[in-house]
Amino acid sequence: MKLGKEVKAAKRAGLATTDAQVGEIVEGKVASHLNGIHEKGVGQFEGRIKHLKGMVSRYAGAFDTEPLETSLEGTIQEIEQETLRHGATLERLRNDFDEADQHYQGFREKHGLSRPPDLSAGIAGALPIFIVMMVIEAGANMFFFSPGSDFGLLGGFFYSLVISVLNIGGAALFGYAFFRWLNSRSWFRKMLGAVMALVFVAFLLVLNVVVGFYRSTFVAMGGEGHANLLQTAIGHIKAMEFGVLDEFSIAMMMIGIALGALACAKGARIGDAYPGYHRIYKFRENYRRRFENEADVLAEHLGKLRDNALSDIEAFQNQARESIAPYREIGKEISELMSRFDAFEKHLESVGNEVLGAYYSKNNLPVAQSKSGHFKHQWVLPGKLFAFGEPNARFIKLAGDSVLGEIMNEGRIQNALEKAKTLRARVLDTLNRMEHLFVAQQGSL
């Protein structure tokens, strides 16, 4: 700086006639020059701060729980709505089950039943046995009818199939529908069961005796070509002409009676042996299954909502944890910029003091009072642009109080993570309260 020329020009212009006026001119020129340097430095620092603020905003989003809260609020509302929607159905099904259970318990009490129903033998298990019986009887009958048929074994297939269905199917139906009445504690049902048992015995004997005589007549008369085979067979029965029966017809009768009796016994063992016990139990269990199915649908849907919510929370927590390190690095860089900015201003102050001190000494000027009152030790530019003890506070204002506050306050990061944990607990608490509406009921079924 050419302070000498500036002072001479001021003296020629009559602006500096005293040493004090000379000092003010020199001090003003130094301040003006240093202010220009300061403004350039501020511009460079502001550019870097702007870049860091952009990074801060980018990483700060990792700790913003508002989107997560909004999403979870929607999830919680959906959980509550789904529970209310299914709750009415669950309540109705529970009432239906309670009513069916009352009938079931009343039936047990009325008939003195303390044991659970025997469900070991169901229709699904008995059906293959009936089919095997029909195959055995049909095979035997096909063999017995083949001598009188023009088509041999194939010709006896139709007769054997019809006889097997009537014999095995009818016996199984009698056993399933009527024979269990013999186990009833009601004397009326016992008597009705006994009557039906006699009817079955008559049915079984009549059917197989007619089949035996029909087979003998069929073979004796040459098979399909003769009419009135059934009437002829019945005529032999009425006349009690047992001599027309050969050993094959007698064997076929015995096989039919034996298989019919076995089919009847097996039919009586389908479900529980006590009449009505199996049916009323199945009726009750049907309502239980309907309730449990509806509860399972709700539980599955709530489970999906829970998993989605917890997944969102976990993703937020992971994102926050991954962002902590770069977030802190930005904070360190801002702290370093604050120190450098402080040092930059102090350097300008030092340069100003040195320049003024050297100028006054060189020109043997007396020490003048500057605006600070002690410029040789702690010089202050006009307007206190560089006041000691203030650079950091002014830098914070330059960087933005909120941004720097977020960077320097790591507690905000921890608060965000803690808030995520709180939201997680809230979702689980809502689920627990909602599931209680049906889990408690389901456990008491």
Image: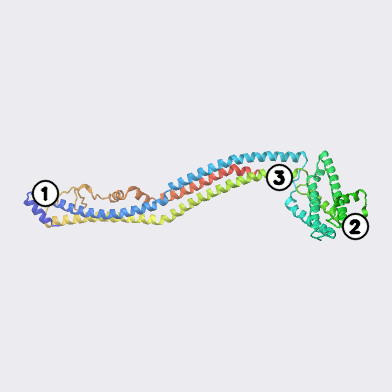
Image position, residue 325 (x, y; %): 40, 57
Q: Nearer the viewer, residue 264 or 9?
A: 264
Of the residues shown, which amino acid type is indicated by label 2?
Answer: Asp
Label 3–label 2 contact, CB within 8 A: no
Give the left or right position of residue 427, taking residue 40 as reference. right
Task: Compute the Cα span from label 3 to label 2.
Answer: 49 Å
Q: Nearer the viewer, mark 2 or mark 1?
A: 2
Residue 253, which numbered label?
Answer: none
Quickly name the residue at label 2: 246
Q: Give the residue drawn at x 48%, y 44%.
A: 74
359 up-or-down from 77: above or below: below
Q: Nearer the viewer, mark 3 or mark 2?
A: 2
Which is more N-terminal, label 1 or label 2? 1
Q: How is the image coloured?
A: rainbow
Image position, residue 376 (x, y; %): 19, 53
Residue 21, which numbered label?
Answer: 1
| Secondary structure of the residue carrying numbered label 1 | helix
Question: Which quadrant is the C terminus positioned in?
Answer: top right
Task: Compute the Cα span from label 2 to label 1.
Answer: 158 Å
Q: Give the residue drawn at x 41%, y 55%.
A: 323
Of the residues shown, which amino acid type is indicated by label 3?
Answer: Lys
Quickly name the residue at label 3: 282
Give the left or right position of residue 407, taking residue 78 as reference. left
Label 1–label 3 contact, CB within 8 A: no
Q: Nearer the viewer, residue 351 or 413?
A: 413
Which is more N-terminal, label 2 or label 3? 2
